[in-house]
Image: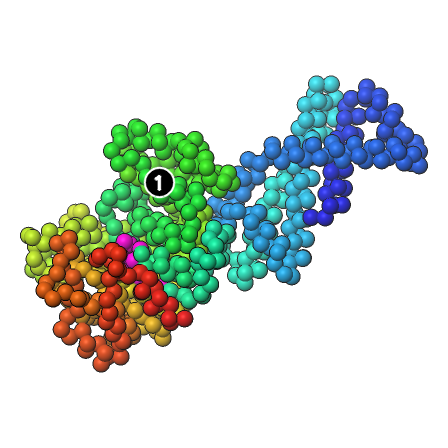
Amino acid sequence: MRIYQLFIELIIIGGLALIATHSILPSISWLENSLIQPVIENANQYIALISFLLLSWGIGFLINIASVRSFKSVYQRIMQQWMMKEGNPSLVLEKLRYQIYISPNSREITRRIEYHYSLIRLSRCIIFEGLIFFILALVYAKFILAIIALLSAAIASTAYYHSVIRSIKGIYYAWMALNKHTVPAQIKSPTFPPLTSQSSESEIHSSELNILAFSGGTGFREINMALARRTQNITRVVPIWDNGGSSKALRKSYNLMPVGDIRHALMTQAHGEGRVGSIVKLFNWRLSGSGEQEVLKQELKSFVNYQHPLIYSVEQSLGHVIVTYLRQFAENMPENMDLRNGSIGNFVLVGAYLAHNKDLNTAIYVFRQLCSIQGNVWPVSLHNHLHINTILADNELILGQEKTTQLDRSKRTEKIKRIVFNTNCEGQKTTDHIPAPCNPMIIDAIQRAEVIVYGPGSFFTSILPHIMVDSIADEISKRDVPKVFIGNLLEDNESYGYSLDELIDIFVSTANQFANTTRPADKYITHILVNKSHTINEHTLNNKHYLNAGESIKRFSNQGISLIIDDLESPWKRGQHDANWIADYLMQFQ
């Protein structure tokens, strides 16, 4: 912004105010005799002219400051209106504006943006002046002047609204263009740069290796954080068939897929990237798990009304956006919804989903940008009613993920034979399988990936179902990149009775079942990480056996698959993978 341009604008604003004041209040003789009339009668009286200009500038400066404060909330509402209409996830416009300014070859873009900001200033100040002088004109019975002032304010209001919209669009589209992205009506690319960075260069490495992970939640958590300290190009694929806990209440109340695993993966990514600001703390906050419903509603209301200390600690411009989403959540919340242990982050995700025309991908992108998260997290499918049903070896049917993960192995010793997708997990038992359409973001992520990772995590509920989603097996088979299967350390309720080599056989046969054609195993898996046990006798941890690699694990070497057999257990956390070792191993593919 050029100084002289702003100086001229303020003089125009102040000068209009002086002329309007003189028209309404002609009794101010000092203004007419000492400033306006001498300038009109004799243009050579430089002192009077300079005095008039300085006074105009001073008045214009004060009017500009007052109008900024008066129209701040109006500007934010217009910005939010455009965001929700267009699916625009870019929230901190001034930060984007700064990025544009410091970019090379952006002079023309900067000039256009400043032109819109100049119109915003002028129209905003004219609205402010017009309303004030409308009131003054009515008080002094200057009805013609009152009409003129009101018309001026009305015309300036239209100009202000369009100028704000054009400036927002100009900043956003210019930022997209400078980063070599196309301008979508809805978000289509998962690789936008972050708005801000809250981590130092020593915390996050500069590797550009693009890693795609099909994994569980807690199983991949430590590895995810270790990878985030080495590369910012991580994409997590999240399952969408959880039907337990708070996710169950949200699914029933809002008729959408569970968002708990999505939020958990986003928070894991934020932690790994070093995002520890007030927004991340807010999104990790949960309501009480034992309070009465009315008490929990009051706590939620304190967030919605911008009264809770956590929401009050967030930067105001972002806080207004978060509150907008929480209001969307609260306004659509059923009266009898169970709020116990409810996550504020989940509520924001649901509110963003509702606000952005029920587009979950856009809602996730908004959530990422609010937290300044670089990595991507996408649901494997956008099917809102997808569940998994489990068929045991004796053909007993288990409905839903929750019951599958909680199988009591002291009573049921049959192995899991297969799983199917269905929309029913509570009513009539059926083994019918329904197709699950793939989220387009996942196809794009597979095509961009330089390393594809499976696991660790619960095999039958967190790993295997991903390969059953439409097109995923075929798309993975097309990629000539490392595809690493990370074997679990411990046997869980789902993998009971199986060895690692048998689980990999199930994975490959399932991939071929849902692919267009049968392919060899190395089209889906190129590397297998196998834990080498140091125990002499059968060893357990918390009543769980260590997963046996299997007697025929080495046969995969004859199928073009590399076996890496090593001690994968963390030296500090028994039963968990050595996250840094695995992250370093994956990073060698760059």
Asked if one can make out residue 30 in the rendered structure from this viewpoint, the answer is yes
At x 10% / y 63%, what residue is drawn?
Answer: 538
In the rendered structure, the answer to whether residue 19 lies left or right of residue 289 reads: right
Mark 1 surroundings: few (<14), some (14-19) or many (≥20) residues within 10 A? some
Type of colouring = rainbow
Q: How many marks?
A: 1
Residue 496 placement, left or right of 177: left
Say left or right for 15 vs 62: right
- Percent of width and height locating residue 222: 31, 56
Residue furthest bottom in the image: 558
* Residue 139, above or below 61: above
Give the residue at x 7% y 53%.
410
219 in the magenta segment: yes
User: What residue span does the magenta drawing correspond to?
Assistant: 212-221
Q: Is residue 499 magenta?
A: no
| Residue that badge 1 annotates | 285
Does the image show residue 189?
no
The picture places residue 534, in percent across and down from the top left corner, at 17, 66
The residue at 33%/68% (across/down) is 585
Position of residue 298 relative to residue 438, above or below, is above
On the rendered structure, is 363 left or right of 504?
right
Residue kind at label 1, given as amino acid type: Trp
Residue at disc 1, secondary structure: loop
How far from the left and from the top, in percent, is residue 414?
8, 59
